Image (tube, coloured by chain):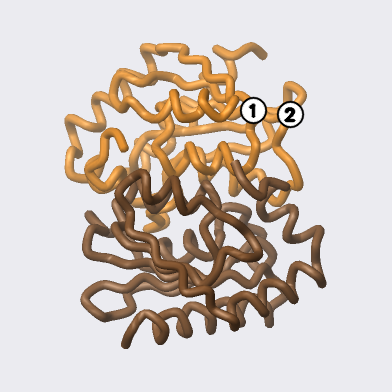
Chain colours: A brown, B orange
């Protein structure tokens, strides 16, 4: 599978989030070409404010000593919480679906030596745009009103 | 209750973590003088790598639109994941028990306008030192080997 195919897997996670009434951001963690974790935002579903898509994915990958060989695919540019997690755990490569709906912290990641690739994926953009238009208060809550930090 | 008393409440959380075989970092979230969230590191207990003490505390405080009026008390200087969460959620004040056992990211917080107070608490230092000496591999796993980032 290539980056586009892995992003499609992350988008499938985001769609599960949308279908269950939550914030539709999905993520997968990949190592040696294998998906080792999947997840999507659980703020609504588990009443869990720290479970952004990337965080839920890292959680679901379980306990690991290192993440140096892992790539995380996320449908949306990561917020500062997820950016901090990526940096602390030493994930070296991040592939994002888009940064149209949220600028995220791409430069912070790059400044910490993380490779960031933006696929500018139409499927990711469309799903997130639709959600933000439908549930602006939920989206505002999810990022505590902070588009950039 | 003053800062020292709230830190004692965070240290009680850390002690629960130690007693249950986990990483002994505890945290509480306070607003208007009331404790609105408590938590401790759940890596071992819940097999949850994202549940550092601060994160578990924020999770347990539940869904909130804003955190501007909240102070988080944590027994240890926050790692980049927890630092990122504090910045993204807009927590304006952080009281830490100590930064002897882990330097954390105090300057990153301050550079984002967060007030940071270090109590340099002997109880926090002693508990964490004891844990690191007893279970160095678990501590290394918890921070993915990254003392500073």
Q: Quickly name the residue at label 1.
A: B92
Residue lying at 28% horizontally and 66% vertically, measured from the top left = A70
Q: Are marks 2 and 1 in contact (CB under 8 Å)?
A: yes
Residue B81 place in picture, x, y as percent: 44, 44
Q: Quadrant of the C terminus of chain B?
A: top left
Residue lying at 55% horizontally and 54% vertically, measured from the top left = A104
User: How many residues crowd mark 2 within 10 Å: few (<14), some (14–19), many (20+)?
Assistant: few
Earlier residue among tags 2 and 1: 2
Chain on which label 1 sits: B
Q: On the picture, is B136 further left or further right than A1?
A: left
Q: Are marks 2 and 1 on the same chain?
A: yes
Residue lying at 44% horizontally and 45% vertically, measured from the top left = A108
Q: On the picture, is B25 further left or further right than B54?
A: left
Q: Quickly name the residue at label 2.
A: B69
Residue B50 place in picture, x, y as percent: 43, 52
Question: Is residue A63 placed above or below B95 in the rendered structure?
Answer: below
Number of numbered callouts drawn? 2
Residue B74 place in picture, x, y as percent: 49, 28
């Amino acid at each position: 599978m290539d980056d586009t195919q892995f992003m499609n897997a992350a988008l499938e996670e985001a769609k599960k989030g949308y279908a269950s009434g939550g914030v539709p951001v999905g993520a997968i963690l990949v190592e040696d070409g294998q998906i080792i974790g999947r997840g999507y935002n659980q703020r609504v579903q588990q009443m869990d404010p720290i479970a952004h898509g990337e965080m839920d994915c890292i959680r679901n990958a379980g306990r690991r000593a290192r993440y140096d060989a892992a790539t995380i695919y996320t449908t949306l540019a990561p917020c500062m919480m997820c950016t901090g997690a990526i940096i602390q755990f030493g994930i070296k490569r991040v592939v994002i679906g888009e940064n149209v709906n949220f600028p995220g912290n791409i430069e912070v990641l790059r400044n910490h030596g993380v490779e960031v690739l933006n696929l500018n994926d139409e499927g990711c953009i469309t799903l997130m745009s639709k959600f933000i238009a439908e549930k602006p208060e939920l989206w505002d809550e999810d990022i505590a009103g902070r588009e950039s930090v």
